[in-house]
């Protein structure tokens, strides 16, 4: 049996667990004190990071939001446990980013930042060194995904698209900490100073759309992904969980090849 850990047990965590054979994985979930979700047979729950570390999982997936990254990821890395971060927007906090980098170095553990709902990040990493590179990332989702935000602003997007936000990646992840991790994934790939972020509620959107427009001395590029929303959360693309599963499988394959998560 391989032991794996997950922080949180929301829609994404449930999809991750369901992607693996129950006979092959011993899952340990780190939950908030007082949380009492119905867990399938074979899944154990703990409420303290020390308990998760003591279980010695081969890898841990963070799937509980930006606060969980700050609260738990450094300790996991210090303990030598490879960790996949879903809420990459947490790294907009420069001191936290530096702390996580140092923890991974000290513990000899890999921190993995998956592509999540996006594609084309390899192109953005390639042009990151070009001083003239400029990128605009647009998150375009149906109004149902932004129902609370539209109501708070007294706006309606029933007939026409509404721009809810335009600004920097750091501002975007602060304004929408649960919904714009993709924006900061773009920023990590090419550099936050080169990126502008837009958030649009669009009644004509056929799904959760991610649009990346890039210009540089290397040329121009445009990527558009229209992802089906997660069945458990319309603000999240179904592709997000698939990306985390793929990253976890990669870590497991590396371990089987003797490469491990530790340096």
Image (tube, grey):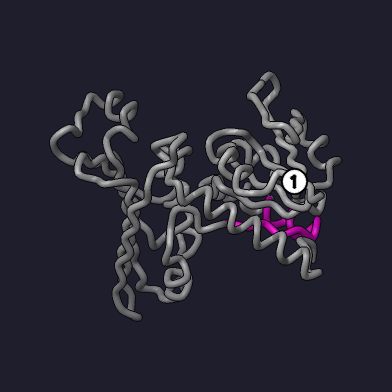
Please tell me whether residue 178 belongs to the stretch shown in magenta.
no
Residue 219 visible in the snapshot: yes
Q: Residue reaching furthest top? A: 34
- In which quadrant will I find the C terminus? bottom right
Q: Residue at x 30, y 32 (%)?
A: 144
Local packing at callout 1 (Cα closer than 10 Å; few below 14, some 14-19, many 20+) is few
Instruction: Classify residue 215 by image quadrant.
Output: bottom left
Residue depicted at 59% across the width and 36% down the height: 67
Q: Total of numbered circles in the picture?
A: 1
Side (left or right) of 33 relative to 91? right
Q: Which residue is mark 1?
A: 23
In the picture, measured across the screen, residue 139 lies left or right of residue 66, that is left
Q: Which of 39/117 is in front?
A: 39
Q: Position of residue 154 (x, y in %)?
A: 23, 24
Where is residue 202? Give x, y as percent. 23, 42
Residue 123 vertical placement versus 149 (above, below): below
Q: Could you tell me which residue is drawn at 65 percent across and 58 percent down?
A: 249
For the record, the magenta segment spans 100-113
Mark 1 element type: loop
Specify whether residue 66 is in view.
Answer: no
* Residue 63: x %, y % from top left: 59, 41
Q: Residue furthest left?
A: 159
In the rendered view, tell whether residue 261 sits above or below residue 25.
below
Identity of the residue drawn at 26% across and 46% down: 206
Where is residue 245 drawn, in percent x and y?
59, 53
Residue at the bottom extreme of this rendering: 218
Q: Quadrant of residue 82?
A: bottom right
């Amino acid at each position: 049996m391989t032991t794996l850990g997950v922080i949180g047990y929301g829609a994404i965590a449930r999809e991750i667990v369901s992607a693996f054979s129950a006979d092959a994985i011993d899952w340990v979930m780190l939950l908030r004190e007082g949380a009492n979700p119905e867990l399938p047979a074979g899944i154990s729950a703990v409420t303290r990071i020390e308990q998760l570390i003591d279980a010695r999982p081969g890898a841990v997936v963070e799937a509980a939001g930006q606060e969980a990254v700050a609260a738990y990821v450094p300790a996991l890395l210090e303990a030598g446990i490879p960790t996949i971060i879903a809420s990459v927007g947490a790294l907009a906090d420069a001191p936290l980013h530096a702390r996580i980098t140092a923890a991974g170095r000290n513990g000899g553990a890999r921190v993995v930042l998956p592509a999540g709902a996006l594609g084309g990040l390899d192109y953005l990493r390639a042009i990151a060194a070009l001083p003239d590179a400029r990128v605009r990332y647009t998150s375009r989702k149906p109004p149902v995904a932004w129902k609370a935000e539209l109501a708070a602003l007294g706006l309606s997007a029933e007939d026409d698209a509404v721009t809810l936000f335009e600004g920097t990646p750091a501002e975007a992840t602060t304004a929408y900490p649960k919904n714009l991790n993709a924006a900061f994934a773009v920023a990590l790939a090419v550099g936050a100073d080169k990126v502008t972020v837009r958030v649009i509620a669009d009644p004509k959107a056929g799904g959760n759309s991610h649009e990346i427009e890039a210009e540089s001395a290397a040329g121009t590029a445009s990527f558009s992904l229209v992802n089906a929303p997660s069945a458990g959360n319309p603000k999240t693309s179904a592709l997000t969980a698939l990306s985390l599963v793929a990253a976890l499988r990669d870590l497991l394959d590396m371990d089987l090849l003797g490469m491990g998560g530790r340096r």
